[in-house]
Amino acid sequence: MTTVPKPVPVPVQLGLPRRLVEFALDDEPVRVPEGSTILDACEAVGKDIPTLCYGDTLTPKNACRVCVVEVEGARTLAPACSRKAEPGMTVRTDTERARHSRKIVLELLASSVDLSTTPHVAGWIREYGAEPDRFGPDAATVADRAPKVDNDLYVRDYGKCIMCYKCVDACGDQWQNTFAIAVAGRGFDNTISVEHDAPLTDSACVYCGNCIEVCPTGALSFKTEFDMREAGTWDEDAQTEATTICAYCGVGCNLTLHVQDNEIVKVTSPHDNPVTHGNLCIKGRFGFQHVQNRD
Amino acid sequence: MDLHFADAKPTDEERDAVDGYLGPPESGWEGGERTEADLRWARGGHAARDRRDLLLPALHAVNDRIGWISEGALDYVCRRLTIPPAEGYGVATFYAMFSVNPRPARVVHVCTDLACAARGSRALVAALEDRLGPAGAARDGAVWQPSPCLGLCERAPAALVIQAGTAPGSGPSDAGQAEYATAVVAPATAEGVVAAAHAPQAAPAEPQAAEAVPQAGDPGLVLLRRIGIVDPADLDDYRANGGYTALRHAFALGPSGVIREVLDAGLVGRGGAAFPTGRKWEATARQPERTHYLVCNADESEPGTFKDRVLMEGDPYALVEAMTIAGYAVGAHRGFIYLRGEYPRALHRLNHAINQTRARGLLGENVLGQGYAFDIEIRRGAGAYICGEETAIFNSIEGQRGEPRSKPPFPVEKGLFGKPTAVNNVETLVNVLPILERGAAAYAATGTEGSTGTKLFCVSGTVSRPGIYELPFGATLRELMDLAGPPESLRAVLLGGAAGGFVRPDELDIPLTFEGTRAAGTTLGSGVVLALDDSVELPRILLRIAEFFRDESCGQCVPCRVGTVRQEEALHRIADRTGAAAATDIALLREVGQAMRDASICGLGQTAWNAVESAIDRLGAYE
C-alpha cells in the first residue's frame, strides 16, 4: 500500500478568519477553528485516533465507529471524525468505554472481513487487545466472497470490504458524479454493487479509479496489484514513488507513480493537490502502459 | 446527470404501472418515445432530479401490479425520475416487501414474531410447510415467507396475503391478470391461510377495529373514545362526536398558543423516546428557514405494537385533524404520513379520510376558511423497521435508502428535504386533540407529574383479552394485566417491545409511567405489554429477538451490522445450555452489547441488546 501523504489542514480563508473554539481534550485545553471536528483537533495536537471509514477528501460518513470518543454528558459515544468541536465541551479519547468500543469494532470487522491488506489495522488490533477469533470458527464472514475480476483495469474484492461507503461517495456526488455504484441489500448482507449486480463493464463506470484511491482496505485495487499479489511478487518495500504531472491534457493533475522493478504498478494522486484532491481520470489513472512499452 | 442504462426494457404492464402513477413520460429523455425534438432539447438539472421522492411510490406501483421488480421495470422507473440505476437498485433491495427476483403474484407474509410465537405460530408454519411447501418456494401461483411482527398481535397468530394485480375496481388486465387484493388472516389457521393465499378476495372480512379495544365504549376513554362509537368512514359522524372542535380552538389560540398548551400539558412523545412534544414543535416553529414539514411516524413496526393501527383504522379523522393542528403550530403546509407497508386497512381508511376532509375544505388551500393551507400525503413503507427511526424516515420518503442520519443536526433544524421538520408518532399527535378540547390543565390533571394524560398499551401474548388498553399514567402493570386476564402461570412480561425489557411476575407493581419504569430499570417504549406464560421457551424468544434485529439492521454502522449477527450466533450456541456452559457466550454478549449501545449510530443498534440483557439479568435466563 502506498503511504498517502498526511494532509496538511490548510484552511481556505474567505473573508473574516474563522473564530476559534476552545474545549477540553483529554483534560488539556485546545483551540481549533470553528467547524473543526474532534478528529481535526486530535490531529492538531498529535493524538492518534484510529480511523477506517474517514477519508481526508470526503465528507465523514462515520459508519465504522472505530474513532469513537467520549463526550461528557452524552448518552452514547461520538465519532471523532464527524462530531464538530463545540465551545466548552469535554472530550476524552482514551477512556475505558471508548477503548472497549474500538476493540469490539475491530473484533467485529476482523472476524467478518479479510483485513489482510488494510494498513494499520494489525497494529490497532494489538494495541486494543482485540481477539477476533473468539467468535468461533463458524462466525459469519464475507471474507469468502470471490473477487470480481471483470475488466482489465481494476478488481473488486468485496471479501475485503468493510462497507465504509467511501467508494460510493467518491463515485457519486462528492467527486465523480458518475453514480455507477451504490450500497445494495440490507444489514450484514449489504454490498457495494452496480445495478442488478451486473459486471462493471455493463455499468456506468468510467474507470476513473477514484474509488480505488479512497478504498481503505484494498478491496478495490489495480489489476496489476491484484495479479502481483496473487503471484506473490507484490513488494511494497521494493517500490519507489515518483510524483509527476500527467501529460495527457492541460489540467495539470499530479500523478504519483508507484514503481517496482522499473515497472509502473499503480498510480495515485496526492490528496492535498489543489487540482485533483486525489482524483484522476481513466487516462491519468490507468493510461501508463505506453511508458513501459518496450517493443 | 449523465445516466447509463442497460438494454432491459419494461413490459407493457410494467410501463403501464409506472405511468399510472407518474403520468405518461413527457419526452424521450425520461423514457418515452424518442422524437426529433428530443435531439434539440435536453431535459435535466434540478427539475428532472427533484422528483427523487417519487421513487418509493413508483417502486410500489410496480410491485403492486407485478409482484416483483424486474430489471426493465427498475430501469424504466429510474429513467422516468432521472435516478442512477445503481441507486435505484440500492433502494429496491433495501426493503423486505420488494423483490428484484421473479416471484408469484401472491405473497403470504406469516408473522413469526414474539406475540405470534406465543400464540402458536410455530405450528402454523409447520402446517404451511406441509400445505404450501417450504418458505420462499413458489407453488400454485403463491409463495409464503416468514415475517417480522405484522402489528396484528391481538389476533395472533397472523398472516397477510398480498396479491399483485391491476388497480382495484379496474377489472382484470388484457393479459388476464387479476385485481390487486390484500387479505388479513388472523387468528390464522393453516386452512384459512391456504384459502386466502389462493383467493385473497374471497377471504372473510376483518373484524372491526373496535374488536381490538376491549374497553370500547367506556366513557372514561380519551384517545380511544370514538373507536367503536363512530363510523370510521363518516366525517359527519366524526364531527358529531366532537371532531374538529380542537382545530377551531387551535385557530383561536394561534400557533404559539397551541405550542404553549402542548408544553403546559406536559405531552411527551409516545413512540418510545419520550421527548417533550411542545419543545420539538417550538424548536421547529422557531427556525427561520422555510419550508417547514410535518411527518407523522406511522411506521409502527416494534414487535408487539399495534396501537397506531387501531387508532388509524378506528378513528382516522382524529389523526387528520391532529396533523392539521400540528402543521399549523410548526408552520408547515405539507404533512406526510409514513405508514408501514403492512397496514392495508389503515391505508384505505386514511386515504378515504384525507379525500373526504379535502373535499370539505378541512384540508387544502384554506382550512376551515382560516387562510391556512395544509395538505397531507401518505407514503407507504415497504418492510423496514429502521424506517421508523426519525431520520431514516426522511431518507425513505426522499427516495434514498432508509438509513438513519447522524445527529446533530436534529430534525427540527434539518429534517425532511433538509428543512426544519417535526416528526411525531400517531399516538402523540392524537393526544393533541384532548389537550386543545379540554385545556392543558385538565389534560395534565390525569396521570402523574412526570407523565401526564393517558397511555395506550398493546397487550398481547398469553392473556385472555389481548388488545389495546387505555389507562391513565400511573396505573400499575398489575392493574393492566388484571384487565387483560393474565395467564395462571405468568413467566415474564416484555415491556416496550423488542427494544424494551423483560420484567418478572413479582414486579407487577411497577407504575406504568415514564419515570416509574425508568426507576425500575426498564422502559415503556412504545407501550408493548407482551405476557409470556411458563410454556414459552425463553431461549427461543430471545433468539427471535436477536434474529429480528439482525434482519432489520440497515447495515450502515459496524457495531450494529456485525454486532447483531454475533449476538444471534452466541444465542444460538447457548440455546440449550445453562450455567457455566453458557458463561463465556454471555460474557461475549455483554461485551458486544455494550459496544452496540455505546457506538451504534441510531436507536436500533443502541437498544437491540436491551431485551436479551434484561432476560439474563432479571429473569435468570440460562442459569
Image (tube, rainbow, N blue to C red):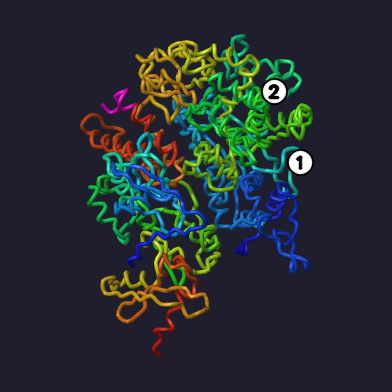
- Mark number for residue B247? 2
Q: What secondary structure do most residues of the magenta stretch adopt?
A: loop
- Whether residue B232 is visible here, answered yes or no, is yes
State the image quarter where residue B202 is shown. top right
**Residue A288 included in the magenta stretch of the image:** no
Q: Which residue is mark 1?
A: B170
- State the image coordinates of residue B432 (x, y, percent, origin top left): 61, 22
Establish if A13 lies above or below A274. Answer: above
Q: Please identify the quadrant where the N terminus of chain A is shown.
A: bottom left
Badge 2 marks a residue whose secondary structure is helix
Residue B50 or A143: which is nearer the viewer? B50
Amino acid type, label 2 = Leu
Give the amino acid at mark 1. Ser
Residue at the bottom extreme, as displayed: A295
Question: Chain for mark 2?
Answer: B
Q: Can residue B356 be spotted in the picture?
A: no
**Magenta stretch in the rendered image:** B615-623
